[in-house]
Image (spheres, rainbow, N blue to C red):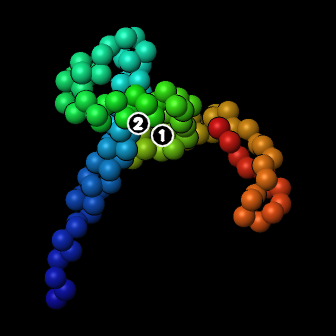
Amino acid sequence: MAPADPLSEPAVTELMRERARLRLGKKRGHVMAGRAAEDDVPPQAIAAQLGLSEPTVSNMIRRYRNNPDAFTRAPMDVVLERAAGEIDQATMLEQLVDWPYTATIAHDANRGELAEHMTV
């Protein structure tokens, strides 16, 4: 008889959910820190509320300020919300189908040619 798998189906499912929660939480933390800083909340106060060090929060604020578009909700966030158990399958599919995708043409430097890319 084969030994039992140490990562049973329920354990794997919970690990996947937690990974999705962590990824969403990291992104949401950057947004919260960045918006709080925009409202003139000092980094020390943000750090205390998030339970993080002031240098960590300062880096989060800097990243958010340098590229706030990187922290807007994207299709991957919808998938992660489903994986984290925040939304159901039907909601995820509806949001992904209705997402305002746009096609753009960009130069592919690796291939030296123009390539069509989907952007959000």
Query: Where does the image place residue 2, in percent across and percent down from the top left?
Result: 19, 86
Q: Which residue is mark 1?
A: 77
Q: Which residue is mark 2?
A: 27
Front in this rendered view, residue 16 or 110: 110
Query: Where does the image place residue 96, in percent across and percent down from the top left?
Result: 58, 39
The answer to whether residue 87 of the structure is visible from this angle is no
Front in this rendered view, residue 11 or 19: 19
Residue 58 occupies quadrant? top left
Q: Residue at x 36, y 17 (%)?
A: 36
Q: Are marks 2 and 1 in contact (CB under 8 Å)?
A: yes
User: How crowded is the residue under tag 2: few (<14 C-alpha within 10 Å), some, or many (20+)?
Assistant: some
Query: Where does the image place residue 101, in percent across and percent down from the top left?
Result: 69, 38
Total residue callouts: 2
Residue projecting furthest to the bottom: 1
Which of the two marks, 2 or 1, is nearer to us in this view? Answer: 2
Report the quarter where the C terminus lies.
top right
Q: Is residue 52 left or right of residue 63?
A: left
- Give the answer, above or below, for where 82 lies relative to 107: above
Q: Is residue 29 left or right of residue 49?
A: right
Q: Earlier in the sequence, mark 2 or mark 1?
A: 2
Secondary element type, mark 1: helix
User: In the image, what residue type sits under mark 2?
Assistant: Lys
Q: Residue at x 55, y 40 (%)?
A: 75
Residue projecting furthest to the top: 39
